[in-house]
Image (cartoon, rainbow, N blue to C red):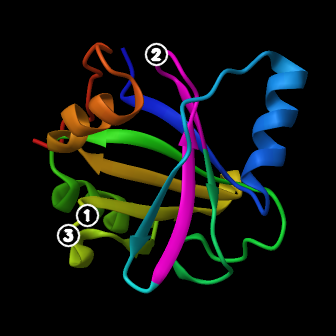
Amino acid sequence: MTAFYHVCFTVPDLSAAMTDLTAAAGVQWREPGAGRIGEWDYRIVFTAGDAPYIELIEAPAGGPWGDTSGARFHHLGFWSSDVTAGAARLDAAGFPEAFSGCPYGRPFVYHRLDSIGGQVELVDLARQPDFLTAWNPGGTAMPAISEE
């Protein structure tokens, strides 16, 4: 069982991307939400149902998502038993940190994997109940990468 739970794309138009994926693949969506991390506002949505999810983020250029002027693959998301230890493991393996939400009270981190043209996101397992409440009420628990 893998700790992979979502794939994320940054998109310049959240509604258009949702419409296109629904038409092309029958994808169903939860209601989009809005948020702010640091100085960056964003809109976000996840597919309905169980993992693996598709995540779409619409945000201005810069910030955690870099160049958002066009649609692109951004990251693969994984739950982690310890984001700090996971970030250290990825750094030591040669995958540099691109952004950490930890200083903003958000326990996640992005690390670049140039070989896949994107990033890996580690999200602290303690956040999973809130994720399920927001994006898949009644959904089942998902496994995490063990950083022990």
Read off the residue under disc 1.
106
Residue name at image x 31 percent, y 49 percent: 123
Q: Quadrant of the N terminus?
A: top left
Q: Quadrant of the C terminus?
A: top left
Residue 138 is situated, as x and y percent measured from the top left of the image, at 28, 13
Label 2: which secondary element: loop
The quarter of the picture where residue 93 lies is: bottom left
Q: Amino acid at mark 3?
A: Gly
Q: Earlier in the sequence, mark 1 or mark 2?
A: 2
Residue name at image x 29 percent, y 21 percent: 142
- The answer to whether mark 3 and mark 1 are in CB contact below 8 A is yes
Q: From which residue to which does the magenta span run?
A: 40-55
The quarter of the picture where residue 5 lies is: top left
Q: Residues within 10 Å of mark 2 (few under 14, many from 20)?
A: some
Q: Amino acid at mark 2?
A: Asp
Residue 134 is situated, as x and y percent measured from the top left of the image, at 34, 35
Read off the residue under disc 3.
105
Label 1: which secondary element: loop
